[in-house]
Image: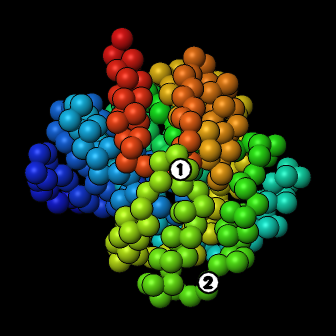
């Protein structure tokens, strides 16, 4: 069952709704003309669909794509998903390094199925698939498991998730574990804590002013604030483990994009994806971190669109 509310932006139609997929409710925003080729954008860990830069979305629609964004399970306006498994990240990371099994509320494979069933709900057979960070992992897995539905793949600031790849920078790991950060869940505390984190992972060559980050974080807090979901999604990444072995199944045009200065997902993760996927193109952007600075939106648009156009050849 799928319910949507149509509206119009200044330039194109917008359809917002909730789809019942994979036993849960997923909130989505579907923009552009339904006769245009579909492009689904998959966001990363703990982030809502609103983190996709509006200018990037507008650019892609102007280039002739129907753009679908959605809140992953457990985030934003989509369903909370918990079966009671405690997200013990330090223990799970250790077990991952030792290649031991990990129990979790869900894995990235469940999120891949969410994506596939959302496309079903929107009556979309094939799509260009774009993912960022954790969303890039989901996009890679989708393209490997549903090659017949993938027109092209663009994976940004992501990885094959193999246990032997470099971990995030130590100070970021401490922040992720809740060390050295101010506690509390009121709006001001949560926003300032997130600001501290975003400044650590942002692009050193393309800085974003604090006030712009704060405005976005305040808006996201008002839309939805679920700190426990962030832990469950982190746990899902660890529990999924490496998937390099599956990437040889991908046969669509593939563009891997990574920042040379990414302190959260090391560039070796992106390089590993590019090596594992047949004929993948790799773009290492000097001075880019783990964010979407507005200075790079034209470049990202160009990379995504050029790769998508290869599918028509």
Vertical order, 174 against 240 (above or below) = below
The residue sitting at 17% across, 60% down in the picture is 5
Would residue 63 be found to the left or right of residue 216 on screen?
left
Q: Is residue 184 visible?
A: yes
Circle on res. 182:
2
Residue closest to the far top: 313
**Quadrant for the N terminus in the image:** bottom left
Q: Residues within 10 Å of mark 1 (few under 14, many from 20)?
A: many
Residue 81's x, y, as percent?
52, 69
Q: Is residue 25 visible?
A: no
**Quadrant for the C terminus in the image:** top left
Circle on res. 203:
1
1 or 2: mark nearer the eye: 1
The residue sitting at 44% across, 67% down in the picture is 210
Vertical order, 177 against 303 (above or below) = below
Asked where in the image residue 45 lies, by quadrant, the reply is bottom right
Residue closest to the far right: 98
Viewer-nearest residue: 93 or 109: 93
Vertical order, 227 against 58 (above or below) = below
Would residue 119 be found to the left or right of residue 226 on screen?
left
The residue sitting at 47% across, 77% down in the picture is 191
Vertical order, 219 against 132 (above or below) = below
Viewer-nearest residue: 9 or 53: 53
SS under mark 1: loop
The residue sitting at 61% across, 86% down in the picture is 183
């Amino acid at each position: 069952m799928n319910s949507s509310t149509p509206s119009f932006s200044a330039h194109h139609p917008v359809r917002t709704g909730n789809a019942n997929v994979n036993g849960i409710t997923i909130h989505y925003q579907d923009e552009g003309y339904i006769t245009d080729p579909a492009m689904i954008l998959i966001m990363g860990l703990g982030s809502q669909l609103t983190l996709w830069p509006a200018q990037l979305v507008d650019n892609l629609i102007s280039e002739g794509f129907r753009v679908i964004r959605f809140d992953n399970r457990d985030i934003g306006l989509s369903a909370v998903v918990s079966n009671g498994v405690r997200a013990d990240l330090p223990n799970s990371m250790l077990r991952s390094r030792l290649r031991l099994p990990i129990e979790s509320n869900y894995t990235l494979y469940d999120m891949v199925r969410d994506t596939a069933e959302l496309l079903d709900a929107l009556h979309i057979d094939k799509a260009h698939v774009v993912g960022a960070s954790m969303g890039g992992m989901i996009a890679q897995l989708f393209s490997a498991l549903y090659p017949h539905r993938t027109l092209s793949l663009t994976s940004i600031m992501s990885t094959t998730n193999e246990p032997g790849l470099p971990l995030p920078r130590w100070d970021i790991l401490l922040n992720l574990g809740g060390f050295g950060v101010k506690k509390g869940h009121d709006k001001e505390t949560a926003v300032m804590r997130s600001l501290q984190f975003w400044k650590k992972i942002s692009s050193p060559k393309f800085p974003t002013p604090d006030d712009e980050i704060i405005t976005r974080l305040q808006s996201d807090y008002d839309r939805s604030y679920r700190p426990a979901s962030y832990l469950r999604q982190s746990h899902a990444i660890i529990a999924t483990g490496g998937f390099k072995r599956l990437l040889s199944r991908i046969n669509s045009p593939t563009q891997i994009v990574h920042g040379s200065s990414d302190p959260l997902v090391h560039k070796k993760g992106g390089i590993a994806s590019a090596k594992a996927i047949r004929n993948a193109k790799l773009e290492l952007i000097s001075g880019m971190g783990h964010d979407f600075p507005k200075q790079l939106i034209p470049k990202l648009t160009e990379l995504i669109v050029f790769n998508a156009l290869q599918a028509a050849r």
